[in-house]
Amino acid sequence: MVISRPIRLLLALLVTALAAWAVRALPVERMAASLAAAQLPWIGAAVLAHLLIQPVAATQWGLLLGTTTPPLTWRTLLRVFSLTSVANNTANSLVGHAAGTTMLARLPGVGVTRALSLLVLDQLCVGVAKITVL
């Protein structure tokens, strides 16, 4: 689907206006006090961990998929995982998993069986990681 330039501009303005409205409603004083009390190394560690989620998960998907013909690039897996994350975080988790599985299945050399297997293995890895952290 191609969206015309004026519509894209209108959507960008709408998103900007909504973001400005949301930021205006934030309790800035309370946030500043919390940040002043926070320890900088922990904030840095949290930001770093957050930034690494997508690349690490794309690498995990590549390892779980194994070799495909033609070979999938890490960048392709990063793109699909990132889109899957957006769907998971904006809709019901089942919708996100279905979207990710569909996108994976359509990649050359993957197919439905491998995409579903990857989803199951991914969820198993997430579960083990959560138990390990706990």
Image (cartoon, rainbow, N blue to C red):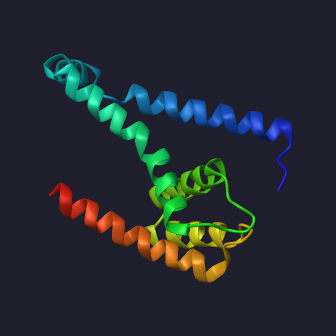
Look at the image and tell me in which quarter the C terminus lies.
bottom left
- Residues 37 and 18: in front is 37
- Quadrant hosting residue 126: bottom left
In this rendering, the count of numbered labels is: 0
In the picture as drawn, the residue positioned furthest to the bottom comes out as 113
Please tell me whether residue 55 is drawn above or below residue 111 in the rendered image. above
Instruction: Residue 44: give x, y in percent of width and height.
Output: 29, 26
Q: Is residue 64 left or right of residue 83?
A: left
- Quadrant hosting residue 106: bottom right
- Quadrant hosting residue 100: bottom right
Look at the image and tell me in which quarter the N terminus lies.
bottom right
Residue that appears at 64% across and 47% down? 75
Q: Is residue 21 left or right of residue 114?
A: left
Instruction: Residue 129: give x, y in percent of width and height.
Output: 27, 60
Residue that appears at 55% across and 68% down? 65
Residue that appears at 24% across and 61% down? 130
Please tell me whether residue 126 is drawn above or below residue 44 in the rendered image. below
Please tell me whether residue 45 is drawn above or below residue 100 in the rendered image. above
Please tell me whether residue 5 is drawn above or below residue 131 in the rendered image. above
Instruction: Residue 39: give x, y in percent of width and height.
Output: 16, 22
Residue that appears at 34% across and 32% down? 47
- Residues 129 and 33: in front is 129
Instruction: Residue 31: give x, y in percent of width and height.
Output: 24, 24
